């Protein structure tokens, strides 16, 4: 199993995507530690509860991570699935379909 670390900062209300290239030395299952924060998210404020991000490897379907830590950076361990040896891209962007309404 391969483990890689990525850092992305997600700003509330920002749909900017960040792309992180990585190399898989061999085919296998990939796991990543992704450090994320969500400025402006606060479970104590109605309408600002949390942000959600879409995570995608290469051109595969995305999966979501609910950011529960607000401004604090939190590490989210995620399973990326099977990858072939070689170059890949991990893309992280704010989910605009299910944002907190505020």
Image (cartoon, rainbow, N blue to C red):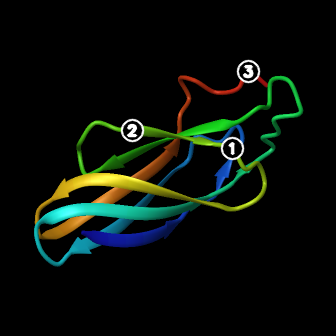
Residue 22 spot, x, y in % from top left: 30, 71
Badge 2 density bin: few <14, some 14–19, many ≥20, Cα 10 Å: some
The residue lying at 56 percent from left, 29 percent from top is: 96
Residue identifier under label 2: 63
- Left or right: 99, with 90 as reference point: right
* Label 3 residue SS: loop
Residue closer to the observer: 40 or 17: 40
Check the image and report above or below for 61 versus 33: above
- Left or right: 29, with 75 as reference point: left
Residue 45 is drawn in which quadrant?
Answer: top right
The residue lying at 80 percent from left, 31 percent from top is: 48
Q: CA distance from mark 2 to mark 1?
A: 16 Å
Check the image and report above or below for 8 versus 13: below
Check the image and report above or below for 57 versus 42: below
* Label 2 residue SS: strand
Query: Please, which residue is most extreme toward the right here?
Result: 44
Residue identifier under label 1: 68
The residue lying at 53 percent from left, 23 percent from top is: 97
The quarter in which the C terminus is drawn is top right
Residue identifier under label 3: 101
Residue 8 is drawn in which quadrant?
Answer: bottom right
Residue 55 spot, x, y in % from top left: 42, 46
The quarter in which the N terminus is drawn is bottom left
Residue 99 spot, x, y in % from top left: 64, 27
Q: Are marks 3 and 2 in contact (CB under 8 Å)?
A: no
Q: Are marks 2 and 1 in contact (CB under 8 Å)?
A: no
């Amino acid at each position: 199993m391969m483990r890689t670390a990525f850092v992305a900062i997600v700003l509330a209300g920002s749909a900017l995507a960040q792309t992180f290239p990585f190399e898989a030395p061999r085919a296998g299952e990939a796991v990543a530690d992704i450090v994320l924060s969500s400025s402006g998210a606060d479970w104590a404020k109605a309408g600002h509860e949390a942000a959600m991000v879409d995570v995608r490897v290469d051109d595969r379907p995305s999966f979501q991570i609910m950011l529960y830590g607000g401004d604090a950076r939190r590490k989210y361990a995620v399973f990326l699935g099977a990858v072939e040896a070689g170059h890949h891209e991990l893309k992280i962007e704010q989910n605009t379909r299910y944002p907190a309404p505020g």
